[in-house]
Image (cartoon, rainbow, N blue to C red):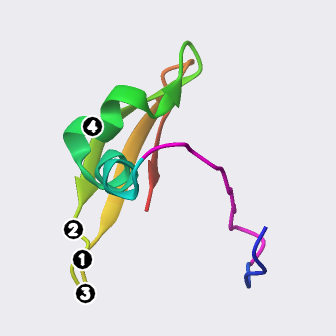
Amino acid sequence: MNPVNVSEDTIVQEIAIKSPAERIFAALTNPDELVKWWGVEGKFQVTHMESDLRPGGKWRMRVRGGSGTESTVD
């Protein structure tokens, strides 16, 4: 893993995926694509996604847990 500065409320995850960089970028930044695969069946799912990668833009998603509790990740 690459060294990063993190605080107690930061989660860092690193994975390797065999796919062209353009496809990975689209899967992480295109709301229509991300909601198709991000989540764990029966545990949580993405219910809303915003992705504006311009300077000052936001990347945010809302997830619903298996108990119905919703959280926002941004």
Residue type marked 1: Gly
Q: In which image quadrant can residue 11 be found? A: bottom right
* Image location of residue 38, percent across then percent down: 45, 34
The residue pinned by badge 1 equals: 57
Seen in the picture, residue 11 relative to 67 is either above or below; the reply is below
Compute the Cα span from label 4 to label 2: 14 Å
**Which of the two labelled residues, at mark 3 and mark 4, occupies the earlier sequence position?**
4
The residue pinned by badge 4 equals: 33
Q: Could you tell whether 38 is left or right of 57 in the image?
A: right
Q: Are marks 1 and 3 in contact (CB under 8 Å)?
A: yes
Residue type marked 3: Pro
Residue type marked 2: Asp
Task: Please tell me the numbered disc located at residue 44.
Answer: none
Q: Are marks 1 and 2 in contact (CB under 8 Å)?
A: yes
Compute the Cα span from label 2 to label 3: 8 Å
Q: Circle 1 sits in a helix, a strand or a loop, which is it? A: loop
Which residues are the magenta region? 7-19
Near mark 1 (Cα within 10 A), the count class, few <14, some 14-19 or many ≥20, is few
The residue pinned by badge 3 equals: 55
Compute the Cα span from label 1 to label 2: 5 Å
The residue pinned by badge 2 equals: 52
74 and 28: which one is in front?
28
Q: Circle 2 sits in a helix, a strand or a loop, which is it? A: loop
* Image location of residue 50, percent across then percent down: 24, 55
Compute the Cα span from label 3 to label 4: 22 Å
